[in-house]
Image (cartoon, helix red, strand yellow):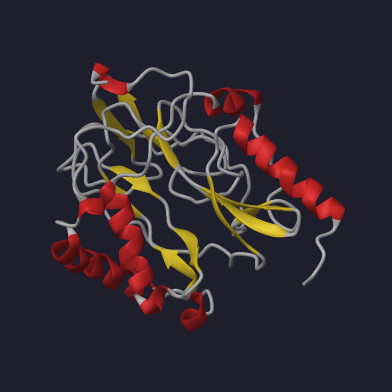
């Protein structure tokens, strides 16, 4: 049995300490770096109120890394925004920091996921009351169907590369004072629809890095969107995928519950 280096143990402890302070959720860690982010086309927004979830590399012990294509989904409550998850490299391992819903966009590793998620914040749209308005400068919206839109080309791109992780060898960004403040707010878990998207992707072997070597074709991504519809029809009645009546808290942040329903 290999002995664990004391410095490695200290580094791992500091990672856990930092993420406990920021209410982040580390779900898993692996010893191999995630592949570079891929280039793909954003599907058109299906209707009012839908939020964009950018594509990312996920990991499972059985499949290894696999691509979860970006998709549109409804938020658990009006006014909520999605902070994407990200991989972080510290202490010789790559740890996954789960994404979450909340009142503000938090730190997501400085990763440029595109389509408004350019490394910090979100430029793809904003809430005005209970209506979400879309920035058509960076999001694919049919303005003959959705009229709550605007155009804003004045946004900053934190980085312009395809790195998929934060830390040495990737994006060495740190959370700003504002992002650290947002980390202490109440966060909410991914919705059943998001979990279903994740499960559909891992079930599709064309999304697996071992099969595509990190080169996921657009036609396979388009096909995965159809696979999801089939997966949804087959599994939507299962307990873990039943629709939520309200957002599910994932920490004990200082923010108040949404909508006064709890």
Q: Nearer the viewer, residue 56 or 40?
A: 56
- Of all residues shown, which one is farthest toward the front? 1
- Of all residues shown, which one is farthest toward the right? 6
- At 34% from the left and 69% from the top, the residue drawn is 221
Q: Quadrant of the N terminus?
A: bottom right
Q: Left or right: 134 with respect to 186?
A: left
The quadrant where residue 43 appears:
bottom left
Q: Quadrant of the C terminus?
A: top left
The image position of residue 251, as x and y in percent, is 46, 31
- At 42% from the left and 33% from the top, the residue drawn is 152
Give the answer, above or below, for where 90 lies relative to 182: below
The image position of residue 239, as x and y in percent, is 21, 52
The image position of residue 23, as x and y in percent, is 55, 33
- At 61% from the left and 27% from the top, the residue drawn is 180
Q: Left or right: 127 with respect to 166?
A: left
Q: Left or right: 97 with respect to 190?
A: right
Give the answer, above or below, for where 62 lies relative to 249: below
């Amino acid at each position: 049995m290999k002995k664990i280096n004391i410095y490695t143990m200290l580094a791992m402890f500091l990672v856990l300490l930092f993420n406990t302070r920021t209410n982040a959720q580390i779900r898993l860690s692996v010893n191999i770096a995630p592949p570079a982010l891929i280039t793909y086309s954003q599907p058109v927004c299906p209707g009012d109120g839908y939020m964009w979830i950018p594509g990312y590399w996920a990991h499972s012990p059985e499949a290894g890394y696999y691509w979860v294509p970006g998709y549109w989904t409804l938020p658990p409550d009006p006014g909520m925004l999605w902070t994407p998850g990200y991989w972080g490299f510290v202490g010789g391992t790559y740890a996954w920091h789960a994404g979450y819903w909340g009142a503000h966009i938090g730190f997501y590793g400085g990763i440029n996921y595109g389509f408004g998620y350019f490394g910090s914040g979100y430029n793809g749209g904003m809430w005005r009351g209970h209506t979400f308005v879309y920035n058509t400068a960076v999001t694919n919206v049919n303005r003959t169907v959705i009229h709550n839109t605007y155009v804003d080309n004045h946004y900053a791109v934190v980085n312009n590369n395809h790195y998929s992780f934060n830390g040495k060898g990737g994006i060495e960004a740190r959370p700003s004072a504002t992002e650290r403040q947002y980390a202490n707010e109440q966060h909410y878990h991914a919705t059943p629809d998001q979990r279903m998207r994740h499960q559909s992707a891992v079930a599709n072997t064309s999304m697996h890095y071992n099969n595509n070597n990190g080169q996921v074709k657009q036609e396979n991504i388009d096909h995965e969107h159809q696979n999801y519809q089939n997966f949804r029809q087959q599994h939507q009645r299962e307990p873990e995928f039943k629709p939520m009546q309200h957002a599910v808290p994932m920490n004990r942040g200082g923010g108040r519950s949404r909508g006064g329903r709890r």
